[in-house]
């Protein structure tokens, strides 16, 4: 089966990137077009228009989710980060204790594309999705596969309208 382990379900909006900063949804009201969120870099609560957030946001992914998308273990990705081979992503922390020791990396879509480029350039590319496949996975587009005459599966995309 071709890449069945890389299909993703739509996830609920909890963490997102907006203007290059990681946010956590505190409260949302589609009826009032409001979204209250915690901005981690600024350490404050902010309010946005829900429709604008949905339009301009980038999804946020944990290291484990990024590893699953890229076909790598989360420990490998953490090693790349800690060794300085890739740019350190933003961190989240408990809102009640921003100065505590616990924190977790959250990756944006552009961070995942940078990791993909690093893996591809350094030759760690066995079972790595193509850049187009990766973008389709991140945007939750449908990827169709067709079997060629040699018996291997190749991805086929619907043209954008």
Image (spheres, rainbow, N blue to C red):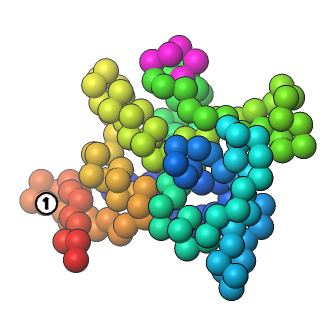
Nearest the viewer among 32 and 3 is 32
**Residue assigned mark 1:** 148
The residue drawn where x is 34% and y is 40% is 128
The residue drawn where x is 56% and y is 32% is 89
Q: Is residue 70 visible?
A: no
Work out whether 85 lies above or below 145.
above
Magenta-colored segment: predominant secondary structure: loop
Nearest the viewer among 51 and 137 is 51
Question: At which x and y percent is residue 102?
Answer: 81, 30
Segment colored magenta? 81-85
The residue drawn where x is 46% and y is 38% is 111
Q: Picture quarter containing residue 147?
A: bottom left
Q: Is residue 15 visible?
A: yes
The residue drawn where x is 28% and y is 46% is 131
Work out whether 106 lies above or below 59.
above
Left or right position of 156 against 66: left
Left or right position of 98 against 53: right
Categorize mark 1 by other alpha carbons within 10 Å: few (<14), some (14-19), many (20+). Answer: few
Q: Picture quarter containing residue 25?
A: bottom right
Kind of element beneath mark 1:
loop
Work out whether 157 lies above or below 150.
below
């Amino acid at each position: 089966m071709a890449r069945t382990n890389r299909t993703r379900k739509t996830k609920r909006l909890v963490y997102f990137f907006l203007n290059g900063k990681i946010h956590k949804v505190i409260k949302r009201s589609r009826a009032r077009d409001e979204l209250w969120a915690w901005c981690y870099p600024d350490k404050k609560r902010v309010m946005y228009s829900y429709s604008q957030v949905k339009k301009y946001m980038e999804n946020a992914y944990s290291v484990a989710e990024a590893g699953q998308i890229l076909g790598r273990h989360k420990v490998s990705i953490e090693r790349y980060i800690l060794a300085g081979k890739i740019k350190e992503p933003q961190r989240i922390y408990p809102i009640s204790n921003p100065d505590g020791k616990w924190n977790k990396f959250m990756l944006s879509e552009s961070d995942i594309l940078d990791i993909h480029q690093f893996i591809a350039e350094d030759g760690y590319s066995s079972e790595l999705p193509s850049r187009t496949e990766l973008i389709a996975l991140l945007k939750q587009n449908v990827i169709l596969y067709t079997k060629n005459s040699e018996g291997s599966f190749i991805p086929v995309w619907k043209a954008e309208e």
